[in-house]
Amino acid sequence: MEVSDPVQCLEAPDPHTAFNSPDGGRYLRHASLNGGTPYVWTMTGTQVGIWEVVGAGSDTRLEFVRHLSEMWAFGRGNAYHGFDVDLDERIGVSFDRHGFVTWQIDDLSDPTRIAVSDIDDVYGNVIALSYPIAFTSGGGRNSGRTWNVSDPSAPELLEPGFWSTTESWNQHECDLGADRLASGRLLSLVG
């Protein structure tokens, strides 16, 4: 494995300097959004920062755009994200202390919150979107949830008790996480 030289240290302006040390994030680019300019959405703790990718080659750098204060993303590093997006469908999903949240993404620098579905005693720090289905898991009682987001303004909770750890089909020694469930590699159906 070859290690390349660092290109840049992140430089978010005051009072956003905490975003200079992200816990993880997503590289987002779509030809029909923002003129094809790529963006990086990072997580720092529970906060989401938006960065624009500017320049080319060795001059490539990230410029801080804004703190997306309306989105709380309880993520756990690069392997687990507190938000996910489908740029072809122009929607995003997150799961925070307020509940399950859907987003309209017409501008990668400024997504718009569409709906919040309140769920008692549940928050998710892992969320995966495989449109039109979103999967969430994390802390709280029976936090595994499956959502139909085909209408992002009215997300529908599907089978609320299916992921409960009290069900025999969920008696496993490991936590698969929503990201692996969405890929289908580790999801099996019980007949």
Image (cartoon, rainbow, N blue to C red):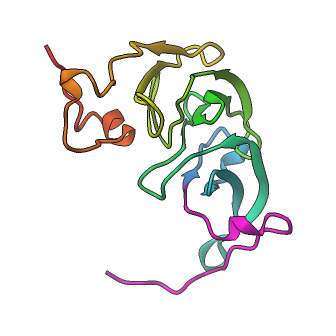
Residue 151, percent from left and from top: 58, 14
Residue 21, percent from left and from top: 63, 70
- Name the one closer to the observer, 37 or 153: 153
Q: Which residue sits at x=60%, y=30%?
A: 91
- Can residue 112 be seen? yes
| 93 part of magenta stretch | no
In the displayed structure, 8 sits above or below 33; it is below
Residue 138, percent from left and from top: 44, 40
- Name the one closer to the observer, 121 or 31: 121
Q: Which residue sits at x=27%, y=23%?
A: 166
Which region of the structure is painted magenta?
Answer: 1-25
**Relative side of 130 to 39, left or right:** left
In the displayed structure, 126 sits above or below 141; it is below
Magenta portion: prevailing SS class? loop
Residue 27, percent from left and from top: 56, 54
Q: Name the residue furthest left.
A: 191
